Amino acid sequence: MLSDKSVSKLIKLEAKRQAEGLELIPSENYVSVDVLEALGSVFTNKYSEGYPGRRYYGGQEFTDQIETLAIERAKKLFKCKFANVQPLSGAPANLALYTALLEPGDTVLGMDLSHGGHLTHGHPVTFPAKIFRFVRYKMKDVETGEIDYVELEKVAKKEKPKIILAGFSAYSRNIDYKKIVEIAKSVKAITVMDASHIAGLIAGRALRNPFDDGFDVITTTTHKTLRGPRGGMILVRDSEEIIKKVNKAIFPGLQGGPHMNNIAGKAVCFAEALTPAFRTYAKQVLKNAKAMEKVFKKHKIRMIGGGTSNHLILADVFGSLGVTGKDAQTVLDEVGITLNMNVIADDVRSPMDPSGIRFGTPALTTRGFKEKNCEKVAEIMIEVLKNKDDKKIKSEAKRAIQKLAKSHPIPKRFG
Ligand code: DSN
């Protein structure tokens, strides 16, 4: 119990909100009490600039061991030669990667934001876009979600990028890693997958590992499908040259002392992700997303990419139901379903009130939801969206959501 009553009260309220509502933001999840304990441990007191065995301050016997443990587990999980577990989160990991591999003015070829890419993949409002050149590829067909590999190759041949970047925050289909590697080889580019969204699904062997198809680097957060503490990580398949550059770029290039309590939390999360129970969870995330897709299809609600092959769905609620993304987010929040409004491919509406909503199944799956429960949630969502001003329907929906939440408490440990 915290002695700071104001903070304690807010923590309790947030815990209640999380317990009583359903979390469908595809990038959110719940950590185990073991991860929480590591995060709240005395490792938070320690400065440890440098890397295991090469630090600038004394007293590093246990920080060295905890960081080494996290690194070894990460390497085993993702089947690669190298892991840097110090990035504070996904954006710093991507920035570090750019500074490691590029000179100012160099070109990166990445996925367009409105076609599912991410802000940190060089959107003009970000800092990396002031330093490096970002060029784009898109989906060929928004209705199937297939990436336009012909165009990707054409742009790669014309622009000669140093990095070809795969990965996304709002894309629901699989990527042809082999094809991208083939194109990258023809223009001597380095292949990087920002796997932040699907790292847990790769670790859980539910989706392909880009390293198996020849990708050079993976950047990722550790708190989404991977179900660990908030943080980032850079993994390198085997290139010694890239490994050296990445280490230098993180420290001393961009960051100071790593957050050792966070690294302890990552070590715990990686051990959890190495268990058979985690593989079962990863596969169930996909089955649950498919179950929700089925309901959205039945109600003829347009999904970008035509559905999902991973953990998330991007639905065009404005086009299908005449409800804006912002209104959909608000009304679903009222009944206890948390998700986020999202632009859809080439959206004509603004990001602050776009056409779409983005939702996914990782957090529900952690709570033990199976296909039937997810179908029910999808039915409730659609009923509410179709009747967003009907108080009776909304209060019935709220009761049903609370019941589902109560019968699926957030687990303290998994497996
Ligand atoms: N905020 C994360 C997401 O929701 O996808 C990415 O930065």
Image: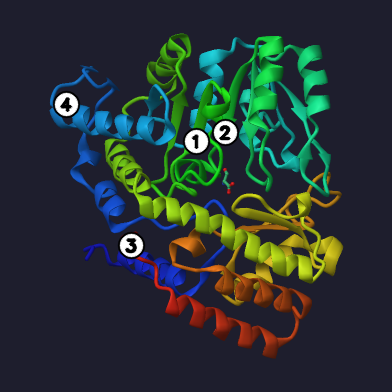
Most extreme residue toward the bottom is 392
Residues at marks 2 and 4 touching, judged by CB atoms closer than 8 Å: no
Disc 4 crowd, CA 10 A, few/some/many (<14, 14-19, 20+): some
- For label 2, the residue is 194
- For image coordinates 42% across by 58% down, the residue present is 30
Do the CB atoms of the residues marked 2 and 1 lie less than 8 Å apart? yes
205 relative position to 327: left or right: left
Q: Quadrant of residue 319?
A: bottom right
Residue 268: x and y, percent? 29, 45
Tag 1–tag 4 contact (CB < 8 Å): no
In this figure, which residue is indicated by the disc labeled 3?
7
Tag 2: Cα neighbours inside 10 Å, few (<14), some, or many (≥20)? many
Which element is circle 4 on? Answer: loop
Image x and y of residue 327, in percent: 73, 67
| Label 2 secondary element | strand
Q: Report if the beta carbon of the residue with label 2 is closer than 8 angstroms to ligand 1.
A: no
Q: Which mark is residue 220?
A: 1
Q: Residue at x 66, y 9 (%)?
A: 188
Query: In this rendering, does residue 362 appear at all?
Result: yes
Which numbered disc, 1 or 4, marks the residue closer to the eye? 1
Q: Secondary structure at mark 1?
A: strand
- The amino acid type of the residue labelled 4 equals Gln
Q: Which residue is under mark 4?
A: 60
For numbered disc 3, what is the local secondary structure? helix
- The residue shown at (51%, 31%) is 219
User: Which amino acid type is shown beneath numbered disc 3?
Assistant: Val
Q: Is residue 218 above or below residue 318?
A: above
Question: What quarter of the picture does the C terminus occupy?
Answer: bottom left
Q: Residues under labels 2 and 3: Cα distance?
A: 35 Å
Mark 2 or mark 3: which comes first in sequence?
3
